[in-house]
Image (cartoon, rainbow, N blue to C red):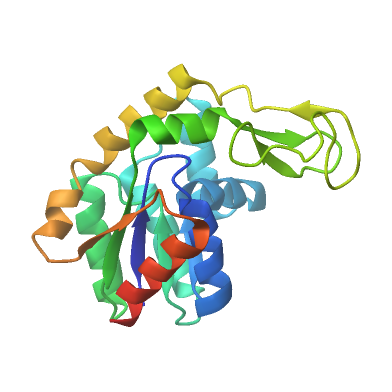
Amino acid sequence: MDIILLGPPGAGKGTQAKRLVAERDLVQLSTGDMLRAAIAAGTPVGLKAKAVMERGELVSDAIVSALIGEHLDKSNGKGAIFDGYPRTGHQAEALELLLADRGRKLDHVIELKVDEDALVERICGRFTCAQCGALYHDTAHPPQVEGVCDECGSTEFKRRPDDNEETVRKRMAEYRAKTAPILPVYESQGLVREVDGMGTVDEVAAAIDAILDA
C-alpha cells in the first residue's frame, strides 16, 4: 500500500506516520531525511544534491525523483508513506511514473484537516522538559505541579523558538501553497480522503485505519 499523508506542521502527520510504520510495516519516505542521509553517505545522488545545495540552489525534481526511486528499490516491496513529496504537479507526475515502473500505484492521499486558529494554539502552547524531554502544553497538558516535570522533577523547561504565532501561520501558508497544485491532480483520480486532524491521536488513527481498511 502506497499513500501520501498530507497536513500542515503540527497537524500530527509525523505521529500518524510513525504509527503506520510500526503497525502496518510501511516505510516512511521523507525527502528531507533522505537527502541528508544521501549527502552524509556520499552516494551519487547525494553528491549531486550536495553540489547543488552548496551553490545555494534548490535541489531539482530529477534529483529528488532519483532519490525516491533508490529508496523504493531498497524497500523490499514494503508499502510507502510519502512525506514532503510530491509538492508540485510535475513531481506528482514523476511519482506516478516511478511507481508504475515498479508495478505500483498510489492507493490513498490522506489529508489531515485542521482548524488554523486551534492549531496555532496547540503549537504555540507546547513545551518540553529541558532535562528528560517530556511533552507538555499550557492548557491541554500542563505539569501536575506548576513548574515541576511530572517525569523527572526538573524545574527547567524549553520551547522551540519557531513555536510562535507568526512563524506557525507562515508555515501554514507555505503548506497551503505547496499542496494547492497537487490536490486537484489526486482529487480527479478519486484518491483524496479527508480526516479531522483536530481529534485525539487515537481518533485520528482510527479514521485513517478506516480509510486504509475500506
User: Which residue does the image show at 69% across and 37% down from the upper left?
Assistant: 142
Q: Quadrant of residue 154?
A: top right
- Is 61 displayed left or right of 45 in the figure? left
Q: Position of residue 172 (x, y in %)?
A: 36, 32
How many labels sit on residues? 0
For the residue pair 98 and 130, the one nearer the viewer reads as 130
- Is 107 displayed left or right of 146 in the figure? left
Instruction: Examine the rendering and report whether any part of residue 161 can be seen.
Output: yes
Quadrant assignment for the C terminus: bottom left
User: Which residue does the image show at 58% across and 45% down from the upper left?
Assistant: 36
Q: Position of residue 67 (x, y in %)?
A: 44, 57
Instruction: Examine the rendering and report whether any part of residue 58 can be seen.
Output: no
- Is 127 displayed left or right of 27 in the figure? right
Q: Position of residue 116 (x, y in %)?
A: 35, 33
User: Which residue does the image show at 63% across and 31% down from the upper left?
Assistant: 138
Q: Position of residue 45 (x, y in %)?
A: 49, 52
Q: Quadrant of residue 23?
A: bottom right
Please say if 191 is above or below 172: below
